[in-house]
Image: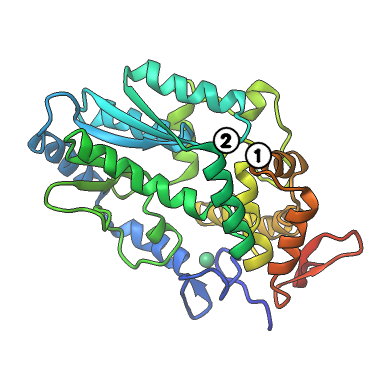
């Protein structure tokens, strides 16, 4: 199989589930262009009146699922400062991996800055570890069950608290190209529960979120001089816990792209990197498996690093990746 890349952003074509293409351009790039014709100012005005008109709960205006990251910080800030929100219930799903100082600081920062109530959902650690181990063993997708809970639980908690409005961040289906339109409402929306993507109201960009979050106290890994991550482009996304990142890295051997490809191609679309700069970074870094994250991941879910690497070897897609002389899986066309 020949490896092909999007002619605009350089993302690998034909491997991401649901990423379509037209004449060699990926649907994430096509959707990025579509954003230019969406009237976001009008959507922002609409949201302010929608929140006002849908106040059905004395205690809370809405519920927001938060990781504590830059996107959560930016969402909460915009709801308070731009859309007249007065009181929010936040729901945080915690994993069992080692927390970073930055992650702890950032979640506290949101709660204290905006005086929000917080519900933390923590699963029985043994059961969560068993789910992660099973999902790793079955499909090299260890976060599968947990990520499903991240979407599901906040909706359950909203219903229990009689809250009719829930916010999520980016509309990933649109940003990553599996949906053709930037829908405001999440498919889980019903007559009694409206689930809104704030990324459909404020055009999503990692840099905009970061800027909005930093202005009100968001800190990154460098601010605490902790965890010099390897195989990364930046130090401010997916930084809440150390082992969690391994669940994202595993995509590399299955689909030929990891976090570096995702971020670099986004930066090309947003105009922060050229195509060639992105390709160089992808080639240099995307295959690298951060040792600290691997260690934390394996220790937390109770497996050896040897077992983890056996699973990686088992699921590696030989059409896309090949082992180099050092035993690292590399994208075939970049070795
Ligand atoms: Zn593209």
The front one of 241 and 285 is 241
With 86 as the anchor, is 311 left or right in this view? right
Residue drawn at (78%, 63%) of the image: 329
Residue sitting at x 27%, y 54%: 186
**Residue 213 tag number:** none
Q: Position of residue 273 (x, y in %)?
A: 61, 52
Query: Which colouring convention does the figure follow?
Result: rainbow
The quadrant of the picture occupied by the N terminus is bottom right
Report whether 197 appears left or right of 307: left
Most distant residue in the right direction = 325
The residue under label 2 is 96
Lower sequence index among marks 1 and 2:
2
| CA gap, disc 1 and disc 2 | 7 Å
Q: Residue furthest bottom?
A: 1
- Quadrant containing the C terminus is bottom right
Query: Residue at point 71% right, 31% down?
Result: 227
14 relative to 160 in the view: left or right: right
Q: How many marks?
A: 2
Mark 1, ligand 1, within 8 Å: the answer is: no
Task: Determine the secondary structure under disc 2.
Answer: loop
Instruction: Check if mark 1's residue and mark 2's residue have beta carbons within 8 Å.
Output: yes
Tell me where residue 27 sits by quadrant. Answer: bottom left
Q: Which residue is mark 1?
A: 300
How far from the left and from the top, in percent, is residue 286?
A: 71, 55
């Amino acid at each position: 199989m020949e490896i092909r890349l999007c002619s605009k952003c350089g993302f690998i074509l034909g491997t991401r589930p649901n990423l379509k293409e037209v004449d060699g351009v990926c649907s994430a790039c096509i959707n990025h262009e579509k954003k230019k014709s969406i009237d976001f100012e009008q959507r922002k005005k609409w949201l302010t009146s929608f929140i006002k008109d849908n106040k059905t709960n004395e205690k809370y205006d809405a519920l927001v699922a938060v990781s504590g990251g830059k996107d959560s910080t930016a969402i909460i800030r915009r709801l308070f400062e731009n859309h007249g929100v007065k009181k929010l219930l936040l729901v945080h799903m915690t994993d069992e991996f080692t927390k970073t100082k930055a992650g702890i600081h950032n979640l506290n920062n949101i709660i204290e800055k905006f005086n929000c109530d917080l519900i933390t959902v923590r699963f029985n650690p043994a059961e969560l570890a068993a789910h992660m181990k099973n999902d790793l063993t079955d499909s090299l997708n260890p976060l599968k069950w947990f990520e499903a809970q991240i979407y599901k639980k906040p909706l359950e908690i909203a219903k229990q608290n009689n809250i009719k409005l829930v916010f999520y961040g980016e509309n990933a289906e649109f940003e990553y190209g599996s949906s053709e339109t930037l829908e405001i409402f999440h498919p889980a929306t019903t007559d009694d529960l409206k689930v809104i993507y704030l990324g459909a109201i404020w055009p999503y960009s990692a840099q905009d979120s970061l800027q909005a979050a930093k202005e009100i106290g968001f800190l990154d890994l460098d601010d605490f001089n902790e965890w010099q991550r390897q195989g990364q482009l930046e130090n401010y996304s997916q930084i809440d816990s150390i082992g969690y990142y391994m669940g994202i890295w595993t995509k590399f051997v299955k689909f030929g792209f990891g976090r570096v490809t995702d971020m670099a191609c986004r930066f090309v679309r947003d105009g922060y990197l050229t195509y060639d700069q992105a390709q160089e970074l992808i080639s240099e870094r995307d295959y690298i498996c951060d040792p600290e994250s691997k260690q934390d991941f394996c220790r937390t879910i109770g497996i050896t690093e040897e077992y983890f690497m056996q699973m990686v070897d088992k699921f590696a897609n030989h059409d896309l990746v090949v082992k180099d002389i050092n035993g690292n899986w590399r994208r075939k066309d970049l070795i």
